[in-house]
Amino acid sequence: MSYIQEVIEQTELKNPGQPQFMQTVKEVLTSLAPAVEQNEAKLRKNVILERMVEPDRQIIFRVPWVDDKGVYHVNRGYRIQFNNAIGPYKGGLRFQKDVNLDTMKFLAFEQTFKNSLTSLPMGGGKGGSDFDPTGKSDDEIMRFCQSFMSELYRHIGPNMDVPAGDMGVGGREIGYLFGWYKKIVGDYENGVLTGKGLSYGGSLIRPEATGFGATYFLEEVLKHQGEHLAGKTFALSGFGNVAWGASKKISELGGKVVTLSGPDGYIYDPDGVSGEKVDFLLEMRASNRNKVKDYADKYGVKFVEGKKPWGNVKADIYMPCARQNEILLEDAEAMVKLGVPILNEVSNMPTTNEAIAYLQSHGVLVAPSKAVNAGGVATSGLEMSQNSGRISWSAVEVDAKLKTIMAGIHHQICDALDAYGMDYNLVAGANLAGFKKVADAMLAQGLY
Ligand code: GLU
């Protein structure tokens, strides 16, 4: 049995009931075959793959809080510190009702490779809670964040582990989390969290960064194909921070975003989401209603209940910005039938492995999320640099650095593919490029 297959089987045995984590492990490890073949004896002796699939530690804790009516609740909190070979653990916190250990582990594993691709010194981590922010008041969110931080603070620090936002955690939540961290620790260590407000150490462009970065990466892909973004139509899912940034940048560059989605369905706006309509997405998120229909009601466009745009709307580019496992095999088949040529994955692992395989074998170009959405965490890395250097860069400076980083990621992927004599397979290339740096660092640091 091959080394990769052995590790996949062992990992499966050790992690029963974790399908999402196993899906990511399989996706990543199988892509690494050319790198493993070249260096198998050394990787095996140093148990590199075995150590890469085993988190450094997995922290699970109780989060008790009181709602506005005085009723007590208990949620579960998580922080997975997966790999710190190249820098302190870094990755977001997700507050969403279906968060569990499996979700946290797949995201933290993925984060290790993503952060490596940014070329900044950040390891991989992820955390969050099964707390559902939908319909919660501001005070409830604050009390929850304070209780969550009452445990998390002992596991994090500017050189140890630096959380940020993810789904359900934006600037407001980071503010409450930071306020409570400072209260407990007593030191003004604002490098402990990223995604902060501008008045206390946040970086310009951080809110936009994931969506902007995803668009810059796509521009590199299009350039490679001899094409341009202007004039293209985009089907997006989600309407949160990521879809907001992407709609803003795409409309600025002359593309047209025709769909958005929420848990309630999708909207179709043939004129494109641009201008004040983009700003309205922020109001929708702040309302905590979690309904995309609000957009259709406000602008009088079509709302399709209970469906996603995939396979229902034709566009030049599909850009899932909502969540994991949105594009299943049947969606991939419908996408091929409609003749959609490019899938630019923005949310983490939006496509199942079998759907990716189907798309690739039918000539659809798939740009993987660990490269496409890396602009968010990369800008968090820039926020860390500004905090530790006590400097602040202008929006133009941060945006230029972000653009350079995204082009650099595309470049690294192409180099990795060239090194192994492979075609333009961005999924394999991103895994190979992300792996190399982490593996080299682990090999240099001995058995730990
Ligand atoms: N949650 C984002 C991600 O998945 C951002 C993480 C960060 O900024 O640390 O990469």
Image: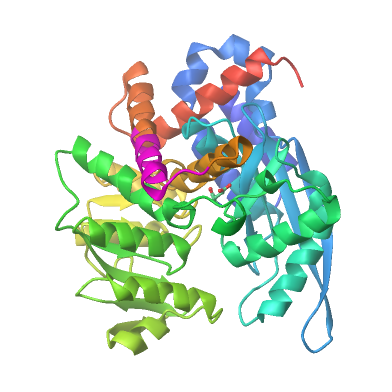
Residue 86: x and y in percent read: 61, 27
How many callouts does the rendering have?
A: 0
Answer with left or right where residue 132 lies relative to residue 344.
right
Foreground pick, 153 / 27: 153
- Assess whether residue 25 is covered by the magenta stretch: no
Foreground pick, 289 / 201: 201
Q: Quadrant of the N terminus?
A: top right
Residue 131: x and y in percent read: 70, 69
Residue at the image point whose x is 72% and y is 77% from the top: 140
Please identify the dominant SS of the magenta region: helix
Q: Is residue 308 visible?
A: no
Range covered by the magenta-colored residues: 392-407
- Assess whether residue 397 is covered by the magenta stretch: yes
Residue at the image point whose x is 28% and y is 84% from the top: 302
Residue 387: x and y in percent read: 61, 42
Q: Is residue 126 visible?
A: yes
Residue 173 lies, with reference to residue 407, above or below; the image says below
